[in-house]
Amino acid sequence: MMKMRGLAWFLAVGLFLGWAFPAPAADLAEVLARIKKKVTELKVQDPVHKTTAVGGVRGDEDRETADLYWAGKREVTKAELAAFEKAVSLAEKGQTAEARKALQAFLEAYPSSALSGEAEELLAALPAPEGGAGS
């Protein structure tokens, strides 16, 4: 009975410590390597003005619409990619304050970018600014 109580106490303390002190963010070098691989898979395109048309079939009101699935590579513009690569380059050089600013500017300029997830991931992996000031 005492062993069970001791085991339960040990597990409770372990769970509390895991909650109170979460694991550190992914290593910056790992994040940068993963992001560089993803960037090579992107398709860069020049901005093109496109017209989109939507059609329907008469008498088709009862059918449920299926979610669209977009296959293929993710696309970004040259300007988008250049801004993102600048931020990644700053992070690789250890200029974390500048990289943080560049990533925040990127997310403001391109909030729906195919690279926004990677930008947020890199922001989270960058060391916190000195002095404990928020970003």
Image: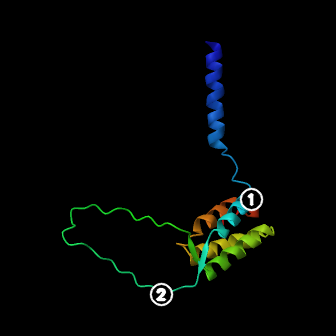
- Residue 101 shown left or right of residue 95 in the figure: left
| Whole-percent x, y for residue 63 in the image | 25, 62
Q: How far apart are marks 2 and 1 (CA)?
A: 38 Å
Specify the quadrant of the image occupied by residue 11.
top right
Local packing at callout 2 (Cα closer than 10 Å; few below 14, some 14-19, many 20+) is few
- Residue 21 shown left or right of residue 57 in the figure: right
| Whole-percent x, y for residue 89 in the image | 75, 72
Residue beneath disc 1? 28
Residue at 54% across / 85% down in the picture?
47
Residue at 39% across / 81% down in the picture?
52
Residue at 34% across / 62% down in the picture?
66
Q: What residue type is labelled 1?
A: Leu
Is label 2 in a helix, a strand or a loop? loop
Q: Which amino acid does label 2 sit on?
A: His
Residue beneath disc 2? 49
Is label 1 in a helix, a strand or a loop? helix
Q: In this view, does 19 lie above or below 53?
A: above
| Disc 2 versus disc 1: nearer the observer | 2
| Whole-percent x, y for residue 17 in the image | 66, 38
